[in-house]
Structure formats: C-alpha cells, structure tokens
Amino acid sequence: MFKKKMFFTLLLLMVITILAACGGNSSEGTTAVSGPASSDGEARTLRISLGLNDQHPLYKGSEKFKEIVESQTDSLKIEIYHSGQIADDRSAIEMLQFGTLDITIPSSAPFVPFVPEYGVFDLPFTLTDTEMVDSVLQGEFGKNLAAKVESQGVVQLAWWENGFRQLTNNSKPIKTLEDLKGLKIRVMENETHIASWKALGANPTPMAFTELFTAMQQKTVDGQENPYPSILLEKYPEVQKYLTETNHVYSPFLFLFSKKVWDELTPEQQEIIEDAAIEAGEYNRELTRQTAEEALEELKSQMEFTEISDEELAKFKEAVQPVIDKYKSQIGTEIVDQYLAEVEKYSKE
Ligand code: TK8
C-alpha cells in the first residue's frame, strides 16, 4: 500500500513539474521576452527590440539609455536586441501590448495602424528640415500626440530620430518623375506610403524591414527608401547601384514602453527611465544628424548619386497632393490641420 501511495505521489509531482515548465510562454502564445517582475533585491531586466543593426545611431542611443538607467539604479538592467532578432516593428509593438516585450523603438509608419494620428508624418514633403522637425516634435504638438497612445497599451516616452528618407534602386538613375514609372519599391507597411509611391508612378511593395535586404539581394524589389545612415550602415550599396536625394518623408523613431510593464514599476523607476529616454534621445538625434552627413559623403563614393531639380520636385509634390487630401480624414482632419499649421507657421518664420 505504501509503495502504491509513493508511486502516485511521485507521478503527481512529475505532472506538476511538466505543467509548470510548459507555462513559460505568455498567455498570448508569444514567447515571453519581458523579464519577470523583480523579487526583493534582484534587478529587473528590461529588453529593447530594435530593427536596425548595432552600428546604427538607434543602437548607440539605446546603449546611452542603458548607461544612464544602470548608473541611476541597481534595480533595473537593460538588454538591447538589434537587427530584428526578437521581432519586426509591428510584431514588437504587439508584444508591448501583451506585456511580453518591454521596449521597442520603431519608425512612426508601422505604428499608424495602432494610432492613426501618427500618419501625419507620412504626408509627403511636409517636414523639410531639422529645425522644423524639432519645433514640431519637441513642442506641444509632439507632447499632445504622444499622450494619445496609452489606450493602445503602450507609453511613448520620447521622440528619437530616424531621419529624412531617400530613394535607392538597382535599375537606373532617377532624375525625373518619369524615371519612377513601374519601379518596384519596398515601402513600410503603411497605406499612405503605398498610395504616395503609386501616385508617383512606382510599384510599391509593403514589407517588414527585417525582410528588406534579402528582397533586394534576390531582386524581388528594385529599390527602397530610408535615411542615409540606414542605407550605409545596413550595407545597401552591396545590392543597390543608384542613390537619389528625395527627402520625401521625415521619419521619427518612437521610444515605446509596454504599459503593462510600466504600471509594474515604481514611480522612481519610471522617472529614471523617462528621463533617460529623453536624454538618450537628444544624444541619438545629434548622432543621427552627424552620421547622415558623413554617410552621404561615403555613399557618393559607393553609389551613383542623383538629385531632383526644383522643377521636377514640383511635379513630385503635385503628384502626391491627392494622397494628402485623401488620407487627411483617415488620419484625422483636426490633427492634420494642427500639424500642417505647425509646418506652415515654421515655414513662414
Ligand atoms: C527599423 C525600421 C526602419 C524603417 C523601415 O525597425 O522599415 O524602413 O525606416 O527604420 O523602423
């Protein structure tokens, strides 16, 4: 009798152990990469998922963020995962919503399906220089926009910088609107970008950033558009011959934090993290601008560089105006009017 009881007790223990081990994934079915809430004395690990590689100012800014946070408290540890190791932008945002990832810093475009108002930045040829960018993002407009995201289960702590987007392709030099006809361009998964490149006569293919290099290597797309630092540091000249300065859109990077995880932190931890995200954002912006200048010079030695004349640029802007008119209501008429007023105000200054 005793042996029988022992056997069933052991069997029960084994079953409990196996069930506990299978419980490692979060309830949402994604593998949890958000560290567990810290128990007494043990530091909590916060993981950052980035799409770009460890040479990019986005990674250097994240290292600065890690340095600041870990110098201010022993209760938090920061781990940085680059090159989409954990997830692409959209999946990473969804993981923040589930609380299975702590931080991600995507471009604004893939965030638009979550918060449509962020679509203002995809309206082509609106933000035209860094002073205008700073006056829009660092002022009331940027603050009010960031306040809209908590309903989506994320907290935006700061505006970082991706930069002004430029066109590369492997088919021919681009100097006129006519040259764009039929060009297969990878674009971000964002309706306004798709509509804009269609209006310019190209053939846009929406695709996650993590698939872009392979798509260019395998020639499933002719080209793509991204800021100079990404073009150089992601080694696009290895698979792209032609570079064209278009400045067609300015992309901010959004420092996004999972609201579920944020609410588990102490006020002191929240203050340290928010201040570090803002300070590291200033570092990231300065480094990105300096890198963009240096990258352009280096890219000119590796690729055939063309610019668009003012006369041709006027045709580009005319071609995309219907896109701005069409997407104004989808993004939100009020926020688009506020945004364009900010742009207009600055343009007159
Ligand atoms: C990196 C992306 C990238 C963006 C794109 O995660 O997808 O082309 O410009 O920077 O967010």
Image: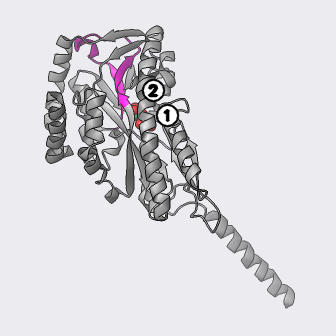
Horizontal side of residue 127 vs 43, given as left or right: left
**Please, is residue 347 above or below residue 71 in the view?**
above
Ligand 1 - quadrant of the structure image: top left
Q: Which residue is mark 2?
A: 230
Tell me which amino acid carries mark 2: Ser
Q: Is residue 123 visible?
A: yes
Number of the label disc, if any, that sits on residue 52: 1
**Please, is residue 204 above or below residue 277 in the view?**
above
Q: CA distance from mark 2 to mark 1?
A: 8 Å
Q: Position of residue 144 (x, y in %)?
A: 25, 50
N-terminal of the pair, mark 2 or mark 1, is 1
Q: Which residue does the image show at 47% across and 13% down from the upper left?
A: 298
Residue 232 falls within the magenta-colored stretch:
no
| Element on which disc 1 rests | loop
Q: Find the magenta span and give its range.
A: 163-189
Horizontal side of residue 170 vs 249, given as left or right: right
Q: Which residue does the image show at 42% across and 23% down from the upper left?
A: 292
| Element on which disc 2 rests | helix
Q: Which of the 4 image quadrants contains residue 97?
A: bottom left
